[in-house]
Image (cartoon, grey):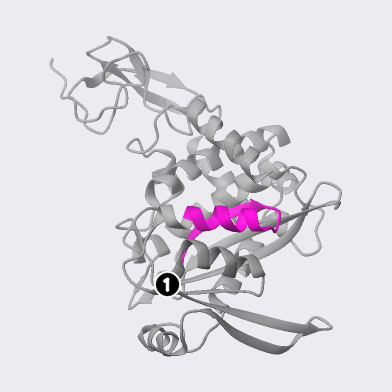
Amino acid sequence: MKHKPIKNRCCQNEKCPNHGKFDEGNIIRHSMYKTKQGQRRRFLCKTCKKTFSSTKGTAYYRLHKSHAEFDEVAQMTVEGTGLSSISRIKQIARNTIINWQSLASRYAGRFNDRKLKSIDMKELQLDEIQSFIGKKKKQIWLFSAIEVWSRLWVSHLVGRRNYRNVKLIFNDLIKRCLFKKVFLLTADGFEPYAWVAKRLFGPICVFAQVIKKRRKNRVIRVTRKLKIGNPLKLEELLFESEDSFTVNSSFIERLNLTIRQGCAYLGRRTACHARDEVLFDDNIELQRCYYNFIRPHSALKFGQEIRTPGVQAGLVKKKLSFRDIFMDFRFILVIIFHWLKSRYQRRVSVA
């Protein structure tokens, strides 16, 4: 009996000439094997004659629990449940939960890098969240950038609040976005924003700052300053905007609230603060993937349909699930070494 070639699979053998290549007609069904969760399919590469399991190259490879349980841990992570709480609820060892979260963040980060490209930039807002690492001695900042029209969380960076990290997140935005015309850029009163925006964007953006003065944790005064551009162009951009009627930072501040609610490390009064910067960054990467592609956004409701920011921006066609992201063979290949190398280089550059 001849087996039909499988189109959505590629050979996982790194020495095979067809490794990572789809639609080559070299992958066929081979056999079945038993696990504690049921039967699994094995595939055969006709080029190198090697077999591999259906989960090879995915987040579920060699997982001793069900796929649904792994997805549930990822869901609890992005809904603000602490590490110890997840361990008690699921009755799984704490170290296993840490490994699962790291694995889920790795594949979510790869999915973000593949999908968050060629974004049409219309209005951009930036802000930071302050936190700490370890024994409250080391301050850490989370930089975030949101595209207002689609509510897409475009970029993030974890590190110190300095000129170098502002430049890094702006460079990341340049790689991911398309600047077809002059756009509106809004941030707080941190001075390096203006320096970097003038150097990297120049006349292609109109940059304004929203400076809030507080007294006893209450905002008593809001000052708006135009740093780049002219008032006439600013009025034109605000008139064309579907969301903003004045210079504001409301959308990025609402995103900050969503991040705080979904990340146990960022609770105001909590014992779940981050002990390690890498774990914190991984958690935020998983949060970004969940926010952009899985979680419906209440502001993007059109009749009975509630879209995700990824659908609104045209990056995906429908609301995804963790299963779609962790099993996406088109974007997930077994190149963990290169991923770890890029992460290490990023840590060195940020430090």
* Label 1 crowd (10 A; few <14 / some 14-19 / many >=20): some
- Tell whether 26 sits left or right of 301: left
For mark 1, what is the residue? 203
The N terminus lies in quadrant: top left
Observer-nearest of 4 and 103 = 103
Asked if residue 169 is among those painted magenta in the image, a careful observer would answer yes
- Tell me if 221 is positioned left or right of 104 in this view: right
Q: Residue at x 39, y 45 (%)?
A: 114
Find residue 128 and report its horizontal and vertical position in percent.
65, 64
Q: Position of residue 67 (x, y in %)?
A: 48, 37
- 308 left or right of 255? left
Compared with 31, 207 (above or below) is below
State whether residue 341 appears in this view. Answer: yes
From the top left corner, tell me how far across and down residue 21 is, in percent.
26, 27
Q: Which amino acid is tagged 1?
A: Pro
Asked whether residue 15 is drawn in magenta, I would say no
Number of numbered callouts drawn: 1
Name the residue at the top extreme: 49
Residue 219 sits in which quadrant? bottom right
In this rendering, the answer to whether 345 lies above or below 316 is above
In the image, 20 versus 144, the foreground residue is: 144
Give the residue at x 35% y 85%: 240
In the picture, residue 90 is in which quadrant? top right
The magenta segment is: 151-172
Is residue 69 in sight in this rendering? no
In this rendering, the answer to whether 34 lies above or below 243 is above
- The quadrant of the picture occupied by the C terminus is top right
Between 314 and 100, the one lying in front of the other is: 314
